[in-house]
Amino acid sequence: MMQKPHFTKETKPVRFLVTLIAAFLGGLLFVALHIPIPWLLGSMASVFIGSKWSKLEFYWPGYIRDTGMIIVGYSIGLSFTYSALIQIVHQLPSMMFMTLILVSFCAVIALFVSKLSGVDYPTVLTGSIPGGLSQMITLAEEIKDIDLTTVTFLQVARLMMIIFFVPLLIFSPLFGGGKSGPSSGLVQTVSTQWDALFPSIIIFAIVSVVCAIIGKKVKLPTAYLLGPIIGTSALTISGFHGPVLPSLLLDISQFMIGGYIGLLLKPEKLNNKVKIISLAVISGMVMIIGSWGLSVLLIKMHGISSSTSFLSVAPGGMDQMGIIAHEVHADLSMVSAYQLFRIFFIYFVVPAMLKWLFKHHTRKRAESFGVEWHRARGGD
């Protein structure tokens, strides 16, 4: 591919404008094609393709993505009513069980990918764990001998596959074409008119932004999403009622997030591109199939709808799963709770487990090297 020229800070507005136009056209195309969540998928796909073939280096400011995350976080937080909280507490054992099974399943898939690709297991495992993208990349940076480029690619490839294929599955006849309503009646999805937002939206907006900033300061995982969820849910449980956002505003939030995600995947930096890309796609599909199997088990255990169950255990990001859950009228509070539990489990428990595993792996490799060196020396 042709080397792109170096751009200065002054060209950022031009680069962003071009990226914005590409993302908007992609969203319009996906709307015309009746593809699910078009403003997320369309903007993501067009920015990804455009950034690879355009002579201009695409640019999408992080604060735009963060704004979109705050909007989604607010929408998710509205679903955490007191009755929803009680229901979630009753399902904590199931959340732990499903999370452990999913993480173990990912570890097994990573082992096969490592054997077939020749990439060391710690790198593939770090790239396969369905945690927050930024958290797993940060963890990879802290551990020696981890291939950061491969970890980033595997994480982004998994995320993009989930974002593309999960909506197609959810809107397919397998899950009722996305028509299933909320199993517990906890989520209202009636579109709100713009004039109905005020004045109650003001206090919720202030709380959401402040909680996002505080979350960033205290290093919460996905702070711009989790902060507003915590703030909004606290207000909701306390008896305050925030307005449901108009669908146009939710489309804009999807657009803000999609353009940013489209720039994350950089396959040109990979070694053994074809093999790793192929294995990433296969492992992603296996992960989706495994998640579907877990969702069937979850339905048997709690009698929730198929769309709610699948989105609860799907190994994607909470923001993307929340967006899809809102679109198909799934139980948003339940989906968010399962996804949130997994994020905290992976954020607080998995790093310690991975570091122990990697130390054990390194020690075994060193011992093996020492034995081989001793044999070679003894043979001289």
Image: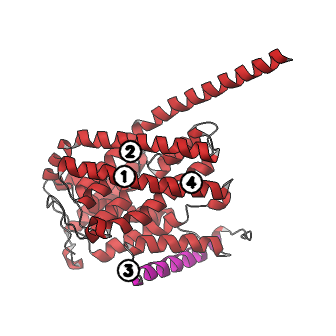
Q: In terms of depth relative to the viewer, which is nearer, 227 or 169?
A: 169
What residue is rendered at 23% in x and 55% in y?
A: 333
Compute the Cα span from label 1 to label 2.
7 Å
Q: Are marks 2 and 4 in contact (CB under 8 Å)?
A: no
Residue 125 visible in the shown view: no
First to last magenta residue range: 10-32
What residue is rendered at 64% in x and 28% in y?
A: 365
The residue pinned by badge 3 equals: 34
At label 4, which amino acid type do we have? Leu
Residue 157 visible in the shown view: yes
In the rendered image, residue 340, in percent from the top left (x then y), is placed at: 32, 49
Q: Of callouts 3 and 4, which one flags the residue occurring earlier in the amino acid sequence?
A: 3
The residue pinned by badge 4 equals: 279
The residue pinned by badge 1 equals: 291
Q: Of callouts 4 and 1, which one flags the residue occurring earlier in the amino acid sequence?
A: 4
What residue is rendered at 25% in x and 61% in y?
A: 204
The residue pinned by badge 2 equals: 102
Compute the Cα span from label 2 to label 4.
19 Å
